[in-house]
Each structure stands twice: as structure tokens, then as C-alpha cells.
């Protein structure tokens, strides 16, 4: 399985100048969904939709179900599907935490995690599997 991501998702990775005064990433987890479609064994992402993190814990993320429903309805009208969930690990690696693994099991969806080491994707199908990430120009 592969997920084809727009290069713009790289903007979620911390980019700092030499003095570390400028950072795109914030100190709390950012989150949202990826819209697109499935093409055989490939997931093609066409849009990144960031939502406000509803969690009060800066080291967790939560997507408000009402926001998710609105995004789903809008996407469906435009012929798109919610194909993955994404979130950041602002100070950590792009590796699923134990909470992430629980979420992966519950949703059955691909989760894209953006960490200080880059962008990685995972799915849980009887076990945790890494999904190959390819960038679209």
C-alpha cells in the first residue's frame, strides 16, 4: 500500500532559521484529515484539511466529530473521500504512540504522522504496518 501526498504536507515539519526564531510547527499537536481517493493499492491525497485540535492535552489530538462530519459532507459533494487522518508530533519522531496505535485499530484508516524526522504513514491490519509515502509534485 502507498499513499501519495502533496509536497505541501512538508510545510508541517519544523523549519527553523539558524537562530531558531521561526518555526512553522507549534508546541501542540496539529491535526486534520486528508481528502482524496483510492486508486487500487494507492491512496491519492488531493487536499489537506487542518482542524483545530479539540484536545486540552498538548501531547494528544482530537478531531471534533461535528467538524469531521462537515468535512465529510463537503468532500462527498466534491467527489472526494476522507482517506487518512494526520497529526504532528512537534517534538517527537513520526512514530505512533500507544494512543495512536489504539486510534489506528479503532478507525481502520491510514494515519499520517509528521514528526521532527519527517512524514510517515501507518495502518493497522492485524498488526501495525508502515505505508510507503510518495510525494506528488
Image (tube, rainbow, N blue to C red):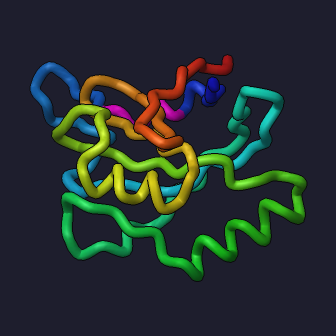
Indicate the quadrant containing the N terminus: top left, top right, bottom left or bottom right. Answer: top right
Q: Residue furthest left?
A: 19
Residue 11 at x, y percent in the picture: 44, 33
> In this picture, which residue range is highlighted in magenta?
9-13
Locate the C terminus by quadrant. top right
Viewed as shown, does residue 105 lie left or right of 60?
right
- Residue at 43% across / 38% down in the picture? 127
- Residue nearer the viewer, 57 or 19: 57
Residue at 65%, 26% in the rendered image: 4
Residue 27: % across, % down: 19, 52
The image position of residue 12, as x and y in percent, is 40, 38
- Identified at 25% across, 47% down, the residue is 97
Question: 53 and 120: which one is in front?
Answer: 120
User: Nearest the camera: 78 or 122?
Assistant: 122
Could you tell me how many numbered marks the image carries?
0
> Hey, which residue is sitting farthest front in the picture?
126
Residue 24 position by quadrant: top left
User: Up-down: is 9 above or below 70?
Assistant: above
Q: Does the segment drawn in magenta span residue 124?
A: no
Amino acid at each position: 500500500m502507498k499513499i501519495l501526498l502533496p509536497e505541501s504536507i512538508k510545510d508541517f515539519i519544523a523549519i527553523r532559521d539558524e537562530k531558531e526564531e521561526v518555526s512553522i510547527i507549534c508546541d501542540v499537536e496539529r491535526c486534520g484529515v486528508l481528502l482524496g481517493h483510492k486508486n487500487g493499492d494507492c491512496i491519492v491525497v488531493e487536499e489537506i484539511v487542518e482542524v483545530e485540535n479539540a484536545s486540552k492535552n498538548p501531547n494528544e489530538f482530537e478531531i471534533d466529530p461535528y467538524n469531521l462530519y462537515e468535512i465529510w459532507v463537503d468532500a462527498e459533494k466534491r467527489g472526494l473521500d476522507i482517506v487518512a487522518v494526520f497529526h504532528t508530533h512537534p517534538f517527537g519522531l513520526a512514530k505512533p504512540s500507544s494512543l495512536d496505535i489504539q486510534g489506528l485499530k479503532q478507525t481502520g484508516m491510514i494515519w499520517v504522522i509528521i514528526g521532527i524526522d519527517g512524514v510517515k504513514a501507518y495502518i493497522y491490519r492485524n498488526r501495525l504496518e508502515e505505508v510507503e509515502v510518495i510525494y506528488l509534485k
